[in-house]
Amino acid sequence: MTEIKDQETAKAGGQLVSAASAEVIIEFTQVNKWYGDFHVLKDIDLSVHKGERIVVCGPSGSGKSTLIRCMNHLEEHQSGSIVVDGITLNRNLKNIDHIRTEVGMVFQNFNLFPHLTILENLTLGPIWTRKMPKADAHDLAVKYLERVKIPEQADKFPGQLSGGQQQRVAIARSLCMNPKIMLFDEPTSALDPEMIKEVLEVMIELADTGMTMIVVTHEMGFAETVADRVLLMDQGQIVEENEPGEFFNNPQHERTKLFLSQIL
Amino acid sequence: MASIKKVPALSAAPPLSEVSVLGWMQKNLFSSVFNTLLTLVTLYIIYITVKGLWVWGIADAVWVADNRRECFEISTDGACWAGVIAWLDNIFYGRYPRQELWRVNLGIFFLFIWMTPLWLPRVKAKISIGMTTVFLYPFLGGYLFAGGEKGIFMQIMLTSAIVCLLANTIHSIIGIFSGRSLPEFISSLSGKKNVSDKTQRNIFLGFLALIFVLIFVWQMSWSLERVPWTKWGGLFLTLVIAGIGIASALPGGIILALGRRSRMPVIRVLSTTFIELFRSVPIITVLFMATTMFPLFMPQGFVLNKLVQVIIAVCLFNAAYMAETVRGGLQTIPLGQFEGAHTIGLGYWQTMGLIVMPQALKHMIPNIVGNFISLLKDTTLVSIIGLFDVLGMLRSISKDLPWLGLHKEPLVFGAILFFLICFAMSKYSRHLEVKLSTGHKN
């Protein structure tokens, strides 16, 4: 609660949330990644503080998805270092499994498990990776389903739900793991316009709880209201990085101006 | 002017041509001159085939006779089923000693009892039941069929199997009536409520241990007469080979398929080599290799019985085929499922066991059952290397003195037998597909 207040004051003061008091939870140093010959990430430097909400935008193919997929090692980087929650990501499988339980992720295509009910989707992680007793996992799942406002769907299968509902289940599934960081990879891109709102509402509520969030999205309204910082990526680089007010009203870089003119 | 429909249109009945029999026939059978002609020709062909079969197989057939000559005397152009009937026991059991046949029947009955709970909706813990069928039943069935002296290992496994069969049966009966599992039931007998999972399990295991000791002592006092494998035969032998093949092909295939997709080069290369090697060779070659070549490579005096060699060969061969089926199923699972599993921290085996395999296996049911059916039919090839399976038995009828030269009828009977078994399997696979696909569309 106090953390939110800190950030509010920091924002009011027109400062980036680089307050020395906030703990750095993700640190990218000179990260490079290639897909074959294609250089996706070029010398990325980035630090994310605890409780910070960051929106990453940019044209397709700019490397924004790859950037956040590196944060829980769904993608492997080839040089530089990535430190998440004090653990350096490398090929150590134990570290990776640990990081993945600390970092929740929501995908464009939900990636729910179609053969399990909504409730089973939610309890799977707590039961198998947190070794939680079944009854406790069940209570936890119900609690988060209520938070994303679909407790009545608990016994259905993902295929029976609308896209917006599925995405909310996906968010609840991640939250059941009690993560320190939430990554969102274009969470609303596969949704019909009327469903985007319900998902964004859940995300805004989540942001209000002080969760560290990194969101790849084209929803500029969301960026303006929720983000502490907005990044623009282009051709594998972070081109501009600023607080939303400045980013949208007074973009510094030509590329940002071009991007904003196309998207708004 | 904008027009707005205020009342939704009522649903009308479909036109008559869509629902009546005559309408259907007109649309599908007699829509043009050519189609009408085609229909009539087809009907005629069906008529003469069915009529021929009817006259030969049923109307003019001989059901009771002592030998083939007698058959001819009664009817010259009907089937002589009397020969098949006289040989029925041989067709089903081969040369298994007649006074010991109850052992085969009992073994099959136990298997039936063991597996029935898998089809009962109210019974819990189906996975454990399935696993014990694969890993424990073979000891019970195997000892019933083969008999002989029990080694200490066999005694332990046999006892475990009997304990498990008992527990299974009681568990299922309780399940049918109360929907509870056996551990829950036992701990509820103590009168306490809300027993934790762990105590429940401990009480249950304690019970099992007690029964184990009792049965172990009991089983020491008797043994069954040894029936050497050379006496096994007929449909019984076919089902033993195919059953073991089916039970081992799926796990073997899953392991090989995962190995082939492994990121570890050694495992990948070994799996791929194994799969490709076995898939590029006809099964009859594998059988000959196993029975005639394999002993040559073994040290002198190392004698493995032929049946075991054949079974191993069948298992390896079918595991290789199954591996490719499973790999095909694995490829239908989108990458997103793996990523979804990773993000909640599931490791490799958990991802495979909880997320990927359940979905992939469901997609693969038709192919898996197809493999099982061809496995069953392929086992008839063992008659070539001198085992008297069901085909071997059917063909020996024509060499039996009273029925000398009776070729056609036994083979027709065999065809019907195989059709019934295979058709049942494929029907069951359809049923499984429908049952498992409800509400899982994605």
Image (cartoon, coloured by chain):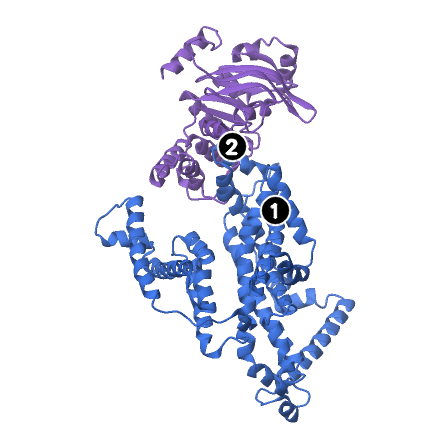
Chain colours: A purple, B blue
Image location of residue A13, percent across then percent down:
45, 6
Instruction: Using the image, tell me which numbered label, if any, was put on residue A195.
Output: 2
Do pointers 1 and 2 mark residues of a single chain?
no
Q: Residue at x 60, y 57 (%)?
A: B299
Image location of residue A191, percent across then percent down:
55, 33
A5 left or right, relative to B417: left
Q: Residues within 10 Å of mark 1 (few under 14, many from 20)?
A: many
A168 left or right, relative to B16: left
Q: Quadrant of the N terminus of chain A?
A: top left
Dot 1: chain letter = B
Quadrant of res B272? top right
Q: Is residue B281 above or below residue A210?
A: below
Residue occupying the far left of the picture: B191
Image location of residue A216, percent across then percent down:
55, 23
Residue at label 1?
Answer: B327
Q: Residues within 10 Å of mark 2 (few under 14, many from 20)?
A: some
Q: A93 or B311, which lies in front?
A: B311
